[in-house]
Image: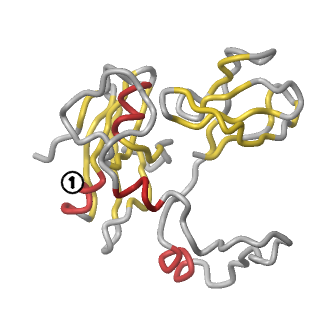
Amino acid sequence: MVYSRKIDERVFTFGVSGRLYKSNVLFYDHQTESLWSQLLSKAITGEMVGTKLTQVGSSRIKWKTWKKKNPETLVLSTETGYNRNYARDPYEGYYRVGKIWFPVGKVRKEMPPKTRILGIEINGRAKAYSLEQLQKQKGEIRDQVNNLSLRIILNEDGEVVTVRDKDGNPVLHIFAYWFAWQAFHPETSIYTSK
């Protein structure tokens, strides 16, 4: 997820708090030290409590896909002044283990807890799409969330390239684990292929 740092004409800077809420990371702003939930898109404690963030459209695709489309892209150097192996994913072990390390409350059983999903929320109605299921279909998938017609576009590698409404306007979406999405959206519906 990507959010605008501007709230009511004021620019904020953010950091990772190291804390979790329903097994999902909380970040904080340097200006007020309020804690922000990334899946709720709002502050949950502190001076900014209840303040919503504005989500900004973004892509989550493989580097090779990005580079092919944007060959002039510059990449940050790994020479950061810190002795760290940036090629090693610190969460690699977490991905492989089926259990959740920190409690989230009751987890619905329609999917395994760590199923990777595409989540869409339209005016208070949420829907989860298993990425594995979407990748099997590829191409364009048409569906609806809260009476809004959607087109989920996947490339030949099965990556979600974009989500658009019937008029071609981008639709905000996120990628998450099923256990986290359903913890924050307990009434979420689930996409099933037709």
Secondary structure under tag 1 reads helix
**Dot 1, how many residues are within 10 Å of its Cα: few (below 14), some (14-19), or many (20+)?**
some
Q: Please identify the quarter of the rendering in which residue 90 is found.
A: bottom right
Q: Look at 35% across and 69% down and name the residue there.
A: 155
Q: Please identify the quarter of the rendering in which residue 85 is found.
A: bottom right
Q: Look at 71% across and 71% down and name the residue there.
A: 84
* Position of 147 relative to 71 (above/below): above
Instruction: Tell me which amino acid carries mark 1.
Output: Gln
**Percent of width and height locating residue 92:** 46, 62
Q: Look at 25% across and 56% down and name the residue there.
A: 132
**Percent of width and height locating residue 39:** 53, 33
Picture quarter with the N terminus: top right
Residue beneath label 1, please?
133
Q: Is residue 64 left or right of residue 45?
A: left
Q: Look at 89% across and 30% down and name the residue there.
A: 31
Q: Is residue 63 left or right of residue 164?
A: right
**Percent of width and height locating residue 66:** 54, 74
**Percent of width and height locating residue 107:** 29, 27
* Position of 34 relative to 155 (above/below): above
Q: Which of the pair 78/132 is nearer the observer?
A: 78
